[in-house]
Each structure stands twice: as C-alpha cells, then as structure tokens.
Image: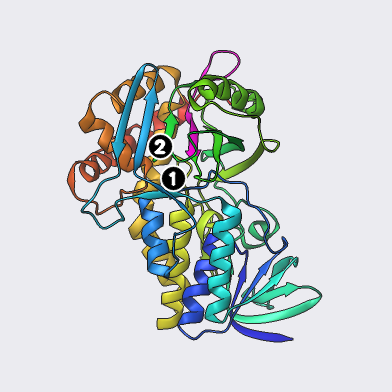
Amino acid sequence: MEHRDIAVIGAGPAGAAVAIQAARHGARVVVFEKGSRGRDKVCGDGLTPRAVSALNELGIALDDAHHIEGLRMIANKTERELPWPSGGRFAPHGAVWPRRRLDAHLVAAAEDAGAEVVWETEALPAFDDDGRVIGVDAGGRRWTAALTVAATGAPGAVAKMLGTNRVPGEPFGLAIRTYAESPRHADRHIEACLTLRDEHGTPVPGYGWMFPAGDGTVNIGVGALSTMKGFKKLNLNTLQDSYRSLVEKDWELGRDLEKPRAWRLPMSAQRRHGPGWVAVGDAAGLINPMNGEGIDYGLESGMLIADLFNADPASAPEQYDLLLGERFDSFLRTGRRFSFLVGHPLMLRSGLRLAVGTDAIANITLQVMGNLVDADTPGAAGRVMRVADKTLAAAEPLLRRTRAAA
C-alpha cells in the first residue's frame, strides 16, 4: 500500500493544476489518468483571458498557443468584433491551444514540480468503514491519501461513488467539434455565431464557433443547452454540418481532419466535497452555462484546493466548498436560470437582438461569454449580472414550469 498527501483522479487542466500547485508547496502528489500519455481530450480549445491569467499564475508559458485578441459575435446579420477588456484583473488577451498540447504542457509542469503521474490506470475512490474517502484503488493497489481530488470531467463511475452527479432538473450542455484546414488559421479573433437552428428550424440556445489554432487548422464546433424544445432528438452531427455550411466559404475550409467528436457539459453538481475529498473543474459542475467554458474554472479550483490543503489539510475540503460558493455560485446560478429563459424560442430571439444590439451591451455579452464576471465584478457587467440574478430568481418558478419540452 502506497501513501501520498494528495491523490488526483484525472490529468486534465483541473487535475494538473492541483498537482502543480500542491507539489510546489511540497506535498507528495500522485495523479492517475486512465488515458495514455499524449492522449487527446475533445474540447473547443479556447482559452479565455481568465484562463490565460490562471496559466500565468501557474507559470505555464503560452509560446505554443495561438494568441487571440478578441471575440467576433454574429447574430443573424449583425456582426461585432470586440477586443478582450484590458486594465482589469485578467489578461488582456485569450488563446487557442489544442488540448493535446495544453494538457501535455500542464502534465510536464506537474512532473517537474515533483508530482508522480500514473498513465493508463483507472482510479476509484477508496472508503473506510465510516464513509470517509481515504485514497484510491488503482492498478490492483490501494493508495492512501490525506486528500483525494476528483478531476474526472463529465460524470462517470467516480461521480456516482462520490455523489457528484448533476443535480436532477438542472440544465446541461452537449457539444461537438472537429478540425479543418483554413488559410485563416492565424486569425486573431475567435468567432461565435449565436443564431443556430436545428433541421426543423427550431432556434437552438447555444452557438457555433470557429477557433483559429494558428497551426494551419481551425477548431469548428457547435454547442447546445438541454433547455431547448426537442433537445432529446437534437442531432449534433446534423447541427455541425449545418453550421459548417454557413462558415465554409468565409473561412475557406478544407475537409474535416477527423470525425466530429461530441461531449457532455455538466453545469451543476450535487456535491463538491466530503470527508477526505473534493471535486474540481467540470467534475464540480464549474462550467459557464452561457458559453460551455470551464478550463479557467478548472485551473482556478485546482489551485484553490492546493493552497487550502497547504494551509490546513483538515479544513481544506469545507473551506474549498465555501470559497467556491462565494466566488462562483451566484454567477453560475444566474447562468442556469438564463438557460431556462433562452430555451423559449421567442425569448432566445429577443435576447440575441439585445445581446449584440449596441457596442455597450455587446461588451457586457463579451465579458459574460469570456467568464470575466464574478460576484464582485465592478462596472456595468457586474451590475447587470447582479440585477439578472435577482430578477431571474423571482422568475425561476415560472421559468421551470414553462420550460420547453425536451
């Protein structure tokens, strides 16, 4: 039986952030990843200014990433190209960094810091007789740990064992993406088309994206929220093909370089911590319901639990959940409520006209879609989100009763 201070399940950005930060504090860390070294992770590959700031805090050089200066938003015939905000607490630029390369850099940093990474090994939480998590069972051995971190992404076996599955009735998302060659691969703006329709003409709450990777390719994909009418019958491949036909000429797209791959976006979690364990990133439901982004939250939550464990291992799980709530819960709650609102086609159409109607409002939309808004964010975006939180709270019972049939 092996013993470590921290056992991490999952070597994505959230798990790697835990390992980097904790190992630098001097903790003995082991990370288990069921994939092989160099494995790919299906993702949009976009890094918000918030994510760039988190990577900077971790000391990760972004020389291998493609620099992004802003967001191009398209809604029907309206197009607005906006720069990322400058002068705030986040970096003034974003990036596109394909996950195969991003994750490899993060894992290398974790190993350089002293963490041990065990590949091609599935790890599951191990419990004592009182229900406390005491480590993991992996590769036919038990590894005990003072803290076990679930960084497993979308719910699976680990989530079922810990009780971190999505809250029933809360929204979630689905997304699909592939890569294609394009002469515009070095474009300095990511592009989001906010007006999508399924094959029946039903407006889709979500967006299509073009993320230039700077390596000869672009990441092209679409995402949709579960609050839309007919969501259970939504064909993501058809939606992807439809969006591709819209952008193919402007981006001079070549053939798809791989078969489009889909993934689930959890946007809530029944639990984020318990005796001896915490969940970070997607496993904790830390995904912005208004854009499907979660890499930045994954990095931040990973660093947070590492810092708290370093300060006081015994209180770290409870303190972690408390601080997550203070930092993220109001914004994420508002986003989930908003997803019920835009699940109604009329409200979606009206909201999109408003979202890009003026530069001032579009800049607020930019900050929301860029994960640049928290409970204490100053300025117009912060005020709008606080008003929206109160307004949508009052409307929530009605929104849930009248939600579109999935």
Vertical relation: 35 (above or below) 363 = below
Query: Which residue, given by chain and number where applicable, does mark 1 sit on?
Result: 288
> Is residue 117 at least partly visible in the picture?
yes
Q: Is residue 200 left or right of residue 321?
A: right
Residue at the far top in the pictured view: 201
Asked whether residue 15 appears in the rendered view, the answer is no
Taking depth in this image into account, of 356 and 141 the one nearest to the observer is 356
N-terminal-most mark, 1 or 2: 1
Chain part drawn in magenta:
197-211
The image shows residue 9, relative to residue 163, as above or below, that is below
What amino acid type should be assigned to the residue bearing mark 1?
Answer: Asn
Queried whether the magenta region covers residue 112, the answer comes back as: no
**In the figure, residue 236 lies in which quadrant?**
top right
Q: Give the quarter of the image for residue 316.
A: bottom left
From the image, tell me which residue sits under label 2: 337
Q: Nearer the viewer, residue 399 or 146?
A: 146
Q: In the image, what residue occupies the spot 45% across and 19% down?
A: 345
> What residue type is disc 2 on?
Arg
Q: Residue at x 58, y 37 (%)?
A: 175
**Residue nearer the viewer, 115 or 339:** 115
- Drawn side of residue 143 relative to residue 139, left or right: left
In magenta segment, residue 205: yes
